[in-house]
Image (cartoon, rainbow, N blue to C red):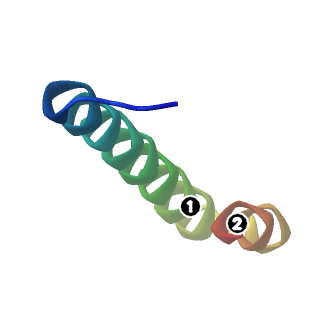
């Protein structure tokens, strides 16, 4: 699969947004002492 610059930038933005959401979920889980679930999300 070959992406042009615009497509690549969109993919980067999408993956970054997914990572940010995952980090926010982990912070929520840790704040609520759901450590086992948080550890699974970290990976």
- Asked whether 38 or 8 is in front, the reply is 8
- Residue that appears at 27% across and 37% down: 8
The tag on residue 10 is: none
The residue that appears at 19% across and 37% down in the rendered structure is 9
Residues 17 and 11: in front is 11
10 Å neighbourhood of mark 1: few (<14), some, or many (≥20)? Answer: many
Task: Write the residue at 80% across / 61% down.
Answer: 37
Q: How far across and down, in percent of the image, does residue 36 sit?
A: 84, 71
Number of marks present in the image shown: 2
Q: Is residue 42 left or right of residue 26?
A: right
Residue highlighted by disc 2? 38
Q: Dot 1: what SS?
A: helix
Can you name the residue that lies furthest to the front here? 2
Residue 39 against residue 18 in the figure, above or below: below
**Most extreme residue toward the left, as rendered?**
6
Compared with 2, 24 (above or below) is below
**Snapshot quadrant of residue 26:** bottom right
Say if mark 2 contacts mark 1, CB within 8 Å.
yes
Q: Residues within 10 Å of mark 2 (few under 14, many from 20)?
A: many
* Label drawn at residue 26: 1
Say if 32 sits above or below 2 in the image.
below
State left or right for residue 35 relative to residue 12.
Answer: right
Foreground of the two, 19 or 4? 4
Q: Which quadrant would the C terminus be assigned to in this image?
A: bottom right
* Residue 28 picture location, percent across and down: 51, 55
Find the distance from the CA under tag 2 to the CA under tag 1: 5 Å
Q: In percent of the image, x 52 and y 30: which residue is there?
A: 1
Residue 41: x %, y % from top left:
70, 60
């Amino acid at each position: 699969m070959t992406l042009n610059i615009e497509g690549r930038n969109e993919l980067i933005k999408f993956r970054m947004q997914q990572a940010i959401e995952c980090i926010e979920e982990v912070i929520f889980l840790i704040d609520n002492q759901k450590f086992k679930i948080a550890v699974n999300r970290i990976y």
